[in-house]
Amino acid sequence: MYRSVRSRFAGWLAEARTSAAGARLPASAAEVMALAALLLAAVGNSRLWALLPAALALGLLAWTWREGSVSAEPSVVARILLLACAYVLGAVHGSLDPALAGGVAVAALAVLSEPLLAAVSDAVYPVSANLPGSGSRPDRRPNTSGVALVNGGAVLVALVCAFNNISGVIALAAATAALGLALFTGLQALTRVRARRSSETKLHAALTAYEPVFLVHWDAPAGTAYQLAMWLPYLERLGKKFFVLVRSQTTFHEVVGLTKAPVVLRMGLHQLDDVISPSLRAAFYVNTATMNNHVVRYTNLTHIQLNHGDSDKVPSHNPVFRVYDKNFVAGQAAIDRFAANGVSMPAEMFTIVGRPQVENVAIATGPIASVANPRVLYAPTWAGFYADSNYSSLLVGYDIVKALVARGCSVVFRPHPYSRRSAELTRECERIRTLLAGDRRASGRPHVFGAEAEVAMTVADCFNASDAMVSDVSSVVAEYLYSEKPFVMVAVSVPADQFPAAFPIARAGYVIDAYRGRLQGLDAALDDLLGSDPLAATRRELKKYYLGDIPADRYAQRFLDEASRYL
């Protein structure tokens, strides 16, 4: 914790030194205004000279704290300067009230305690959940943001008393309350740090006694729990003890809500030895996060990559898959994809297990032309982390959905969860939801969108609720292939005539050209999708290639059997 405290103070000092250079513009401007208020209070002929800059400083501080995003450190300097302004106003423009002076001093102590309090609070984090014998789970971090807000209130009270020549007793009372809250929060943080350390001392023994057979390592940005959630039911069906190892507090809290299995948080590389218990045989991964390397180094385990989707996207043939002992893939298409893109991997590194998540996907019972009022799933992907993995059709999605509605279709709209990370894609999603809401009111068509499609329904539910689909280069296309229902793919990264060569699964679907934002071939693709459907036989052939030649009645069992071999 000493290192954490030292780095916290070093960071605060560095920020104080660099804020004038514009590191954080609102906080920097608040410091400038607070300094101006102090100087004008000292040299001005009236208290009012300092009023405007002081008010501006307070307003800028409020701006930095908007929407509950309170960061105490950038405002420490500004608030100390404002307290000094309050003291000078009392000393220069009137007889200094001892109570006001005391209030200023106590409020300054409360404000200056914030960096130390934040450092101690950083040392509060959970260690495990659902693990017998590991001790009580430490609560979340104390509310240091609340302390900063109360301290800001004490500063405001001191300024009001100073400007209006009001008795400083009010300022002293407010400052005392603020300091009391800071001390209480600090004591609370120290108590929780002790609880965390107690849990850590028991962790290795608790895991050893629990005797897990495998672990699941997961590290990902916030809001990505679907990667793990899709695999947890099947890992639980293995009937072996396991735990989920996560690397951040955010992922810890997300996973605790997904499973009753033990969840263990280890943030640092040096903390991992405590969790590699003697009973462990294997480690599973559901993405290619950099921190996976921290666990792959344990050569006594078999490391198995499951991945959270199988598609023709660039990330699906990333050379990083070579680091795992085994890559469980959906079908032969995944293996051929690596070779086709120059990623050489021996055959023994792969095991075809299908995509167990599609076991409950219903297979089409008849041709789409026999459906009077077809329902079409529009499931666009997101923009990706990098330009070469941006396959999202959302920028032309409104026109696609509008064309479907014009044909009398009802629509299930389920965008990728990451779409909300882009303001532009978020706006397009809202445009589509507004269009569907308006048409539902006007025509009564049973469109499904918003929380109903994105939260209440699973991906498989959306598949089963549709008769056809429009999507992008995405794992949902391969999974939809299991249903044998027709689908359209939107060509965004390359022109339509080059699309099947770049993304072979497009041979089973109809293609809309949206290269460089120009929508072409929409009507022709929808004619085939909703009419004669000439690619029905091709879909049945590619289904085995992409999803494995596995009997439907034992489809998920293939994964369970293959995984059990390593346990």
Image: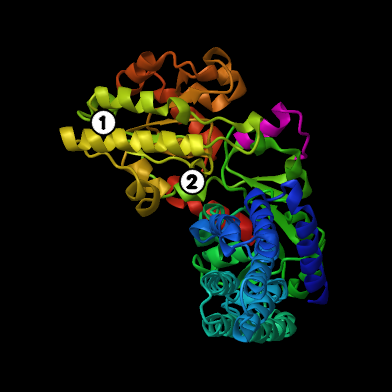
Under mark 1, the amino acid is Pro
> From the viewer's perspective, is the residue at label 2 or at label 1 nearer?
2
Residue located 74% across and 40% down the image:
347
Q: Badge 2 is on which residue?
A: 417
Residue located 52% across and 53% down the image:
226
Q: Is residue 56 above or below residue 105?
A: above
Closer to the N terminus: mark 2 or mark 1? 1
Residue located 37% across and 24% down the image:
400
Q: Is residue 69 above or below residue 502?
A: below
Residue 319 x %, y %: 75, 39
Of the numbered discs in the image, which one, if any, rests on residue 374? 1
Under mark 2, the amino acid is Pro
Magenta stretch contains residue 344: yes
Point out the stretch of residues depicted in magenta.
Answer: 333-346
Residue 260 x %, y %: 51, 72
The quarter of the rendered structure image containing the C terminus is bottom right
